[in-house]
Amino acid sequence: MKIVKRDGHIVDYDPEKIRIAIGKANNEVRGKEKATKEEIKEIIHYIEDLNKKRILVEDIQDIIEEKLMEFDKYQLAKKYITYRYTRELVRKANTTDQSIKELIEGENEYWNNENSNKNAEVVTTQRDYLAGITSTDITRRFLLPEEIVKAHDEGIIHFHDADYFAQNALHNCELINLDDMLQNGTVINGVMIEKPHRFITAATIATQIILAVTSSSYGGATVSLSHLAPFVRLSYEKYYKKYKDRKLSKEECEKFAMQDTKKEVEDGVQTFNYQVNSMTNTNGQAPFLSVNMYLGETEEYKDELALIIEEFLKQRILGFKNEKGVYITPAFPKLLYILEEDNIHEDSKYWYLTKLAAECTAKRMVPDYISEKVMKELKKNEFGDGECYPCMGCRSFLTPDRTMSRGNIAKAKNYVEGKGKYYGRFNQGVVTINLPDVALSSEGDMDKFWKIFDERLELCHKALQIRHKRLSNATSDVAPILWQHGALARLEKGESIHELLHHGYSTISLGYAGLYECVKYMTGHSHTDNGEGKEFGLKVMKHLNDATKKWKKEEDIDYSVYGTPIESTTYKFAKCLKARFGTIKGITDRNYITNSYHVPVFEEIDAFSKLKFESEFQRLSPGGAISYVETPNLQNNLESIIEIIKFIYDNIMYAELNTKSDYCQKCGYTGEILIDDNLEWYCPNCGNRDHNTLNVARRTCGYIGTNFWNKGRTEEIKERVLHIDNKVAE
């Protein structure tokens, strides 16, 4: 018999623990109130005779109380109840101490694998986790209702980022209004930063802004290279004047000025990359940064922007050197390449950039691709105009701008009347519903499924309202770089951020996970079957959207459906499902559940069919979604990558290619580091299994991880099938 503990862990049944617990209560009473050895033995036999495969520890305690009262041991039962309550208090009080001890000693599996871009052994990460453990404890005991904590612990929902929730001023992710901050000045740590007059200075200031912003929030941040493009022209004009003053001809001035400008762009991009990857923010990691490459964001400075994009791609193809001096694939910054008319056709002016992007994808897994064409079909503002803009972090997309008719509520200095505004907007946070748990709890009864679904959605709604309310108490003073100096707004000192949480300026996300397992259990089919399974899957997605639309209309808060990038949570949800429902073939028999709406990683499907199929579900994840195709090494097969890129442009809003680019420091092997049947990573060339000397990069949930993963995610990575062979795509 297995015992399911309060935290979801499963341990072997041990009757001695029952004897000890009753014995301690026995010591508190006298005479006939004491339980005899025979009575204790009878209680133990009663529990064992239930023949349960698994039983909750709370149920065992309930049985003990009931049996003691059957024996007329009322005082003893009272003492046992008191003992049980006292133990619960001690358990809660010691949770933080024990977690901190395990973290510092490197024994806590959760924190060691919580984030594949954080190394829990280094002091900067440990300091963040120490604060996170304390925040989680405060959140659980004082800030969240018991029903939400219980649902979170049981894997029914997931309340994201509880390790940052104790502070009432931290939001999830954002699009930094870099243009406003560079053109109109900003303030960092009380120091005025005025408009720069050279590209290399602007690039350096941008990294300082990124560090300050990501230290004041906990999710991903995105900047756009179009905001740096005007400074390339300023540099060119400076060099041109230098050569003109030397009395050189116009042709010579242009030639030498352009040479100097290109060298400055090269140096500026290198500085940007070095800074971003060598800096550590208050979250104990390099900034979780995305860089947007969208030619359509500027007409005036398009050629200058193309120079920057080209240099970013070239430097990423080269890679960054590791401690051994070998070029490897870095996790950040994540690159976002917008596909548009100016770069998608062979005769387009900027086609050379797309070819360079394809080469970069083959070597370094980035950039990711956003289709301007499809996005403008899906993302229409309040006036019906299609908009194109990047995600905030790995996949979080703002909903179309509904604030245009309300004017400049953020008081940005670069606000343009009647034009959609996205930079400066942000996300308030995420709560995720476990869809397989809804299905399994219904026992396959459709009426019961929809009833439980609504109950769970309302639980998520309540948790999201708590997130919103906590953030609404903040004033601009809590993070001046965000709210006073242009990153998100330019509010007055002491001014509330409350208005920016309403009217569509920011989003708040209803996440979901495990659509495949949910549909499979309820219908017996995968949601990829183009029949009953797919139909039911789309109904589930529509139901999620109907809920958020209702909440949005009632509260003027921009609730949005979000395909959650569950990393460590995929393992937690899987364990909780097994604990609650046992092992069910094809549903709970793995150590992970499927991310969002994705085709399950083990299901055979070609790249083009996968992208086409998932595009239908991506449309129903307006708050965030990304699709991918898994590929072999395609460095010698760029034709296939280009065909996929073109297909993305015509068919799906946001997608990426997962290629392989690993390195073994012991033997110098470059290729794919493998996973054995025990879920251990090893070099196929020399057998090296030391994580410290293996450089492995894998896409885990929209972004690249480089610090390895928990058991569940590792199993998911191992089971991924390729969606394209190594032949030129037809």
Image (cartoon, rainbow, N blue to C red):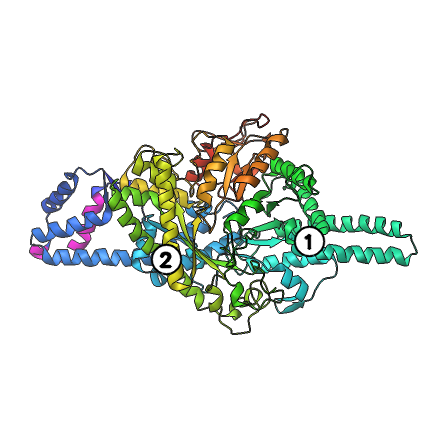
- Viewer can see residue 667: no
Give x and y (percent) for residue 415.
Answer: 60, 65
Task: Tell which circle, 2 or 1, labels the residue nearer the N-terminal end.
Answer: 1
Left/right of residue 140 with respect to residue 315 in the rendered view: left
| Residue 499 vertical placement versus 116 (above, below) | below
Give x and y (percent) for residue 561.
Answer: 42, 51
| First to last magenta residue range | 16-33
Which disc, if any, is residue 1? none
Name the magenta segment's main secondary structure: helix
Q: Residues within 10 Å of mark 1 (few under 14, many from 20)?
A: few
Residue of label 2:
550
Which disc, if any, is residue 299? 1
Kindly identify the amino acid type of the residue bearing the numbered disc 2: Lys
Residue 26 part of the magenta segment: yes
Q: Which quarter shows the C terminus? A: top right
Q: Quadrant of residue 576?
A: top left
Left/right of residue 188 with respect to residue 155 in the rendered view: right
Give x and y (percent) for residue 412.
Answer: 59, 66
Give x and y (percent) for residue 419.
Answer: 58, 60
Viewer-closest of 110 and 512 = 512
